[in-house]
Image (cartoon, rainbow, N blue to C red):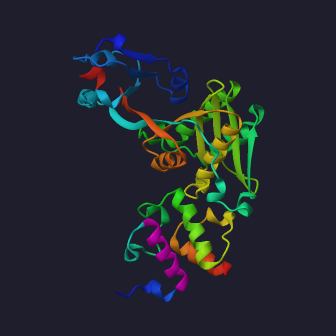
Amino acid sequence: MNYPWRENMILEKIIIALSKLLDIPASQINPDSLLSDLYGWDSLNSIRFIDILENELNIVIPLSRIEKMNSINDYARLIDEIK
Amino acid sequence: MKLNDVKILSTFWDDEILDKKTSEIKILADKDFIEIDSLFNLDSEYIVLKINPKFQRYYLNFVSKTFYQIESQIEIVYENVELFDIHNFFSKSKLEEFQFNQVSANKISLITDIISNNLPFTTDRISLDPYFSHELANKRYIRWINTMVKGDAMAFELALNDKPIGFSMIKQIDNKNVDLILTAIYDTSKSTGFGLLLLALTLNLLTGRGYKNVYTRNSSNNVNSLKTHLYLGFKITDVINVFVMHKKIGITNGK
């Protein structure tokens, strides 16, 4: 199956990371989804998610920006900005 | 059920804040027969009924009298509390961005002013009740916090780069036991993981002060908070189901 987000490497990495973290198929994760709407998303997974992204993408996500991260696209834009 | 099998608590401050004459009833004993009408004869507009799930067979009686379940209070305890290694979740450089400090009683408005604007309490029985509101729930918390710090409760604030993001409050039971009476993360910082940090820092402070057992309670309407407490080492000890009834809105005198 072809997913539009596969054309965006950062988005793809975020979705794959989320898929592994929450144990849900990547095909069920929409980039426009609110993180809070994803099954299994909670504050513990929020911390784990940031840790995974930082390690996978070799970046540092500023804590001050985390509060404004509501959707997967928000993270994609932030990472695009940081890298 | 006779009235000596229930405990009726004075709720004078709820009378004032909610602007309703209120009664809070705890069902203490199991009996073969429930004379529920006695509860309706209380001179109260708003009745809160707290009952252990072991009395489940009475639930239908309450529901038929227009009580509705608003939450379950989940009693939890962390026995022999241990230091939590926060570095498992936050790097040293990230932790340096946080400040965790006690807020003295005469500066408690630093917290209550934020609550007034931010309305962080959204899962308690007042906030979720369609006949009340978030605003009323938060006003009630402010009143309660002010009362607690005038006693011997202590408040601690968590800030990120000096911007407040939440607070916790504790009250000593004795020199080994402590009640974690409240933890709250402000709306803008919810689902960030900062709640885990707030709780871990509070527990580490309590451990450092020599407390052994930490008691608190979670609402069933706030599963994320419960998950965080259980993750850090708390265990569930009891569940109390909470029913409420607005007499003027519901069936009057149970008829």
- Asked if residue A32 lies in the magenta stretch, the reply is no
Residue found 49% across the figure and 57% down from its top: A42
Reply above or below: B223 against B60. below
- Check the picture and name the quadrant holding the N terminus of chain B: top left
Residue B9 pos. (x, y %) = 47, 18
Residue B32 pos. (x, y %) = 22, 17
Residue found 54% across the figure and 43% down from its top: B121
- Check the picture and name the quadrant holding the C terminus of chain B: top left
Question: Position of B72 compared to B136: left or right?
Answer: left
Which residue occupies the foreground of this view, B89 or A36? B89
Residue A79 pos. (x, y %) = 62, 77
Question: Position of B64 compared to B220: left or right?
Answer: left
Reply above or below: B103 against A64. above
Reply above or below: A62 against B74. below
User: What residue range appears in magenta?
Assistant: A9-22
- Asked if residue A21 lies in the magenta stretch, the reply is yes
Reply above or below: B94 against B135. below
Residue found 72% across the figure and 36% down from its top: B108
Whether residue A2 can be seen here: yes
Dominant secondary-structure state across the stretch colored magenta: helix
Whether residue B132 can be seen here: no
Question: Position of B91 compared to B46: left or right?
Answer: right
Residue found 58% across the figure and 59% down from its top: B192
